[in-house]
Image (tube, coloured by chain):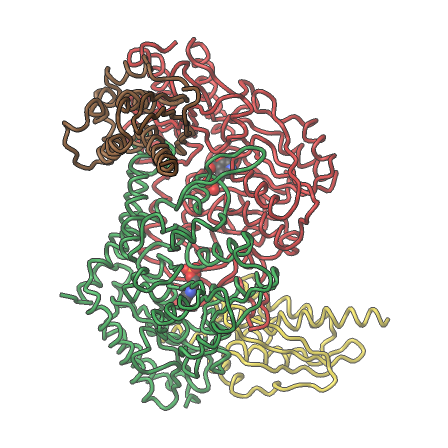
Chain colours: A yellow, B brown, C green, D red
Amino acid sequence: MDELRELYTDTLMSFYLAPDRKGKIADAQGLEGKNLSCGDRIKVFLQVEDGVIKDAKFTGYGCVISQSSATVMCRMLLNKRLDEAKEMIDRFIDFMQGKDVPEELLGDALYFEGVRRFPSRVKCATLAWHTAKELIQKLKGIQSDAG
Amino acid sequence: MDELRELYTDTLMSFYLAPDRKGKIADAQGLEGKNLSCGDRIKVFLQVEDGVIKDAKFTGYGCVISQSSATVMCRMLLNKRLDEAKEMIDRFIDFMQGKDVPEELLGDALYFEGVRRFPSRVKCATLAWHTAKELIQKLKGIQSDAG
Amino acid sequence: MFSPEQIRKDFHILEEELAYLDNAATTQKPDNVINAIRHYYMKQNSNVHRSNYELAELATQAFESSRRTIANFIGSEPEELIFTRGTTESINLLAYSFFVGGLIEAGDKIAVTIAEHHSNFVPWQQLSKRFGTEMVYVDTDDEGRISLSEVKKALDKGVKLLAFTGMSNSLGVVMPYVEICHLAKERGVLTVLDGAQLVPHHKVNVKEVGCDFMAFSAHKMLGPMGIGALYGRRELLEKMVPFLYGGEMIDEVTLEDTTFNVLPYKFEAGTPNVAGTVGFGEAIRYLARLEWGKVQEHVKKLADVLIHELERIPYVEVYGPKDETQHSIVSFNIKGLHPHDVSQYLNSWKVAVRSGHHCAQPQLKRIGVPATCRASVYFYNTERDVERMLEAIKNITNEFPWVG
Amino acid sequence: MFSPEQIRKDFHILEEELAYLDNAATTQKPDNVINAIRHYYMKQNSNVHRSNYELAELATQAFESSRRTIANFIGSEPEELIFTRGTTESINLLAYSFFVGGLIEAGDKIAVTIAEHHSNFVPWQQLSKRFGTEMVYVDTDDEGRISLSEVKKALDKGVKLLAFTGMSNSLGVVMPYVEICHLAKERGVLTVLDGAQLVPHHKVNVKEVGCDFMAFSAHKMLGPMGIGALYGRRELLEKMVPFLYGGEMIDEVTLEDTTFNVLPYKFEAGTPNVAGTVGFGEAIRYLARLEWGKVQEHVKKLADVLIHELERIPYVEVYGPKDETQHSIVSFNIKGLHPHDVSQYLNSWKVAVRSGHHCAQPQLKRIGVPATCRASVYFYNTERDVERMLEAIKNITNEFPWVG
Ligand SMILES: Cc1ncc(COP(=O)(O)O)c(C=O)c1O
Ligand SMILES: Cc1ncc(COP(=O)(O)O)c(C=O)c1O
């Protein structure tokens, strides 16, 4: 049971139960990501103005880990510049893959530390982040095309 | 070494060294057989008159076991009726496959008793016999077509 | 006397009171299988068929004796039993040989059911796309059952081949496979029976069932991974072109062309997995010693207890049939919780179940869920395993209070 | 320090002073490999990837850690290393994917050498017949060597793909594989390197060699049977269609179509042979600990002693080169005696060699013999093994007095 609590902390559960970033953003770019090992899907929406993320939301079905992680991510992306956002995402993915990342740079993402001990669940935690990263790449392309 | 002598008896060796049935028979029906496990081939020729084998020879390349067995077989087929020949062949194949066959019915084929202990060599000993059997089947077909 | 407690002692991995309920994915291996593999590598290891030194004789004998044991178990001739890597390769072998060899041609129709595992679905679908044949799908009912009238409807569309599972891996439905084969034979339709789940649980005699082909995997019936078999009716195998090309399956190779070996070697290219066949043979010997009536009764009872107790829990939804057409596999969900979280939770109770789509997306889509938890029972499971799982599920609200 | 006597202790099957000289067919397995397989089945056995209970985590970790170990050993990325049943399946995977997926089309030309094992010859030849492509054969010299000028000649006929062996299994010729890959690359020709014999004896770094694909088998390099690998350059693997269709390699299946998983899983349909990959990984760990320079020197020396001592016996004929292009494999015949009789005789001396055409009929035809005896050395062989064989051959006239 204790092991389980490391994974399903009260904080994670509360993020899961109050998904305040869930929903579509009309007119914003969205991208769907899938986790092949369980069939879950998440769609991330980012509203960007002048290279800054003004709104971030997600839709989709998934487990406690993937849903709470999507919520945390969307919150953290708000008001970030695209390049900052990308850096933040890379940091989180590195952290989840067991690399050393200074804790103070992680912010709320640190709540997912416990997931690192469950290799099969790391994918759940990073699904939204991988999807957002790809979306940011696309948005940057559009930006530079326009610029 | 003793084990080897069981396989390569002096009698077998002498059959191998004096292959008095080796050669083609002009105008006689022939059939080629192959041993896939070593690539050996043997061609058996049978000269049949009125349902009786008047001449039997073989050509081909092979090991001591397959060559000596072909010699013994060709000798034994001489002057046999086709159905007698087929029976004799079936008996030998049964014997080599470890089945109980009355020794007195085997004649010179009994010299191959030692081969039965070497499963990979049974195929060498029966190659000519399987080929002859198939040839006899063909010849019988021709006979009954004609008759 | 059949005693699961006694049998459990043959499976050392279960010693620590693990309720292993993922048997539909792969079963555990008894000591005799593990030891046979070890013994093979310690005492007999060599390549087979082509050499005549002592190790090669031993290895060849072990190899062919396993083939005879397994063929005998399913009622086929040894020459009709082809060793493959598993069910997936067996079915791909058939599909490629049919399509590449022209036994199935553009314009032909192929029927599969929507209850199939991806392994008996995607090969037909993808090669159909490539070679211009048409797929006909046999629907299931809401519980995953296939009705003979649906099968007839599909067959009467003039299909050339019907590929179907004897027992579905997502919902545990035992299909009326004898009747289905009969319907197909009446209409001259070739049958490919996916035996991956069926053969571990039911004594299948291929001649009595009357299927043309049957595929199964050792690892789902006590045997090692990486080995399986394809049964095929001799006349059909003889008409087919080989699938894999390489050593062992060759008669003669020249620059101009190649002729092929006799059955079953024509379909067994490359150095065979001799150790795998040795383990497979041992697994079958173990199974053949069991009292199958008792074994089936035991498995059915455990699965039934699971189904009925789960059904009584208000926040649990159980899928699939709940009658005699159901065997061994129990698919369910907990309301408000993702199956992934459920299986993770059960792990903390030392209960191993699988969660996901079980490589059967068309079936899950049909019953309207993206994923389920699946508990699957084998004969070494005990009432304690089932009770442990049920107790865990009953306590799940302690961890996830919003459930229900 | 490299000591064959010491190493031999890791191979219990060799305890009884068996001179096992059929290593080109399959090698023996050290204890760590046999134990790793046993340990896997006793402690970690489960299906991989799709479940999150503890056994599944252990099995998945073991599986992926083997992949990384093996990829690292040949200098590839883990995603570029596909697990297959062995070299034969690896090459068939390529051939089918190319032909069925349209990367090779009717009218294209494919080059292979006549030194190939049937596994790297027959798939190309037979699928060429079926799909209307043309075969171009690269000849060898009388010793089985391939010259770069012959390769150039073939490549300049406008071939799309060259499939060739790094080391021939019939005559032990080490081909100039780096130079050959270079010539092919200059001309934009795809290269398939058959590493079945090469990789067990030479440290191959695929990126340095510059081949597009490389196939090899675990069982020829201390690993278990039934497992092997295909390396492929990522861009090419990404362009290719899958070969086997089934579970694990699927992204999403609908009745209309199927999308596929990422590399390497796209090519790994069906339940993987996890135990096999665990044994393969252990084998590579064993090999990686050896001093390769010493190992190669030792093997080369033993084979050279065999060649030169056999050559001094008047009734022996040795085939293949006798210089630095030769490694490990010694093919020979005794005048007046069939190779089958020779290997049988050697068995009575507890010397294991193979006799036959070694699945290389085009090569043997080229040098004008239907069959040979083949002694093949690995690093656990000792001078005593070689001496035993030589003594046996010197005494063969005692048994077969007409020889010579
Ligand atoms: C050069 C070569 N290629 C391919 C193969 C086929 O390997 P496998 O039988 O392991 O598939 C072999 C060995 O049998 C070989 O020596
Ligand atoms: C019904 C069914 N068919 C086919 C398969 C595929 O078997 P394997 O993965 O052993 O090839 C499975 C299991 O995975 C199955 O349950």
Which quadrant of the figure has residue A74? bottom right
- Left or right of residue B9, residue D262 in this image: right
The location of residue B106, given as percent across then percent down, is 19, 27
Q: Is residue A12 above or below residue B25?
A: below
Q: Is residue C323 above or below residue D5?
A: below
Inspect this view and state whether residue C206 appears.
Answer: yes
Q: Residue at x 26, y 26 (%)?
A: B80
The location of residue D350, given as percent across then percent down, is 30, 25
Nearer to the camera, D172 or C262: C262
Q: Residue at x 46, y 86 (%)?
A: C336
The location of residue D323, given as percent across then percent down, is 55, 18
Nearer to the camera, D299 or A82: D299
Q: Is residue C391 above or below residue B8?
A: below
- Left or right of residue C402, residue D120 in this image: right
Nearer to the camera, B14 or D197: B14
Q: Quadrant of the N terminus of chain A?
A: bottom left
- Left or right of residue D115, residue C371 in this image: left
Which quadrant of the figure has residue A33? bottom right
Q: Residue at x 27, y 13 (%)?
A: B14
Inspect this view and state whether residue D281 appears.
Answer: no
